[in-house]
């Protein structure tokens, strides 16, 4: 029995890492009041950039860095449109997704079917990796998986136990009150949006350099939209993001493992997207947004002196 459970749990964590990194980045952005529907574009650009740079240089960590930078730049573009120009955040996010999806397909054409010279290594943690069940479950992964796990308490501690986190959450709730205290709403939102993009870029790099070390157009398969839904599902909370990411990762892994029992893999594959649609419907309702803890100023442009 354990021979079945341990590989399943290991695969669940591996599949959930992309979701977890991306959701943490989106939580950080949206807690500051900037809605990000450009996750799919950032994710796919992170994936293709990481793969292209690694293939060209032979250095996987340069690929990871490049993926983080390109998604961070996309976050900066989104911030400029939404914060400086004060344009519609939903439209900006959708435009970013279309831009990223199209551009990644164009830039990634020379790399379709190529094999990576190297990929993100698996690094078992000494002693901990030998623990029953938990060892293989949590401690035999790569550095980005460990980073995602460490970021959960780190982001939670920052948001709920530090002065900077209080400022971020307050800006997401009432930017005018924070502005009256002399804190720059614009600068904080820029920083959160760019850092959120960096984490989404790392999620894309993990996807093409570790989880499925290859590049093909459309390889993200809508995972960016699942991340958007997961952010709502997690109620913008890092610890709930951990549970949601591994839940969806587990569903992804079970697609083919349950096929011998007569359960269609297509049915399981559709579940995360169905859950995403439900989450987005909840997020679209002002009353439900308040009930599930959405930042009050999420999606609303801020202009000093205007209510």
Image (cartoon, rainbow, N blue to C red):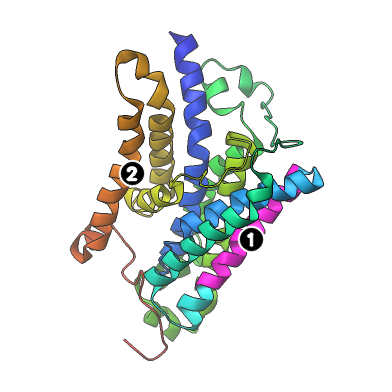
Q: Which residues are magenta?
A: 60-78
Quickly name the residue at label 2.
273
> Could you tell me which residue is drawn at 44 percent across and 41 percent down?
242
Quickly name the residue at label 1.
70
8 or 106, nearer to the observer = 106
Of the numbered discs in the image, which one, if any, rests on residue 305? Answer: none
Q: Position of residue 10 (x, y in %)?
A: 52, 25
| Quarter-of-image position of residue 285 | bottom left
Q: Is residue 169 above or below residue 132?
A: below
Outermost residue, left direction?
A: 287
Q: Position of residue 95 (x, y in %)?
A: 45, 67
Residue 218 visible from this viewpoint: yes
204 or 125, nearer to the observer = 204
Q: Is residue 78 above or below residue 55?
A: below
Quadrant where the N terminus sits is top left
Q: Position of residue 158 (x, y in %)?
A: 51, 57
Secondary element at tag 2: helix
């Amino acid at each position: 029995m354990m021979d079945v459970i341990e590989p399943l749990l290991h695969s669940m964590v591996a599949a959930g890492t992309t979701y977890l990194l991306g959701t943490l980045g989106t939580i950080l952005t949206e807690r500051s009041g900037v809605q990000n529907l450009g996750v799919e574009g950032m994710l796919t650009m992170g994936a293709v950039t990481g793969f292209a740079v690694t293939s060209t240089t032979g250095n996987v960590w340069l690929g990871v860095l490049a993926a983080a930078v390109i998604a961070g730049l996309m976050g900066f573009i989104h911030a400029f449109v939404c914060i400086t120009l004060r344009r519609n955040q939903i439209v900006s996010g959708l435009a970013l997704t279309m831009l990223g999806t199209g551009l990644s397909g164009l830039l990634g054409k020379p790399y379709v079917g190529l094999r990576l010279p190297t990929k993100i290594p698996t690094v078992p943690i000494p002693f901990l990796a030998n623990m029953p069940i938990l060892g293989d479950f949590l401690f035999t992964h790569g550095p980005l998986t460990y980073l995602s796990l460490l970021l959960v308490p780190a982001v939670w501690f920052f948001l709920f136990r530090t002065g900077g986190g209080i400022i971020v959450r307050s800006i997401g709730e009432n930017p005018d009150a924070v502005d009256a205290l002399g804190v720059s709403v614009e600068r904080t939102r820029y920083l959160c949006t760019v850092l959120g993009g960096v984490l989404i870029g790392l999620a894309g790099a993990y996807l093409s350099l570790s989880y499925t070390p290859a590049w093909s157009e459309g390889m993200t398969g809508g995972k960016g939209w699942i991340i958007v839904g997961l952010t709502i599902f997690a109620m913008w909370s890092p610890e709930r993001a951990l549970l949601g990411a591994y839940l969806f990762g587990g569903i992804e892994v079970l697609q083919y493992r349950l096929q011998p029992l007569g359960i269609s893999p297509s049915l399981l594959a559709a579940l995360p997207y169905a859950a995403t649609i439900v989450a987005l419907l909840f997020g679209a309702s002002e009353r439900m947004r308040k009930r599930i803890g959405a930042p009050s100023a999420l999606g609303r442009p801020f202009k000093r002196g205007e209510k």
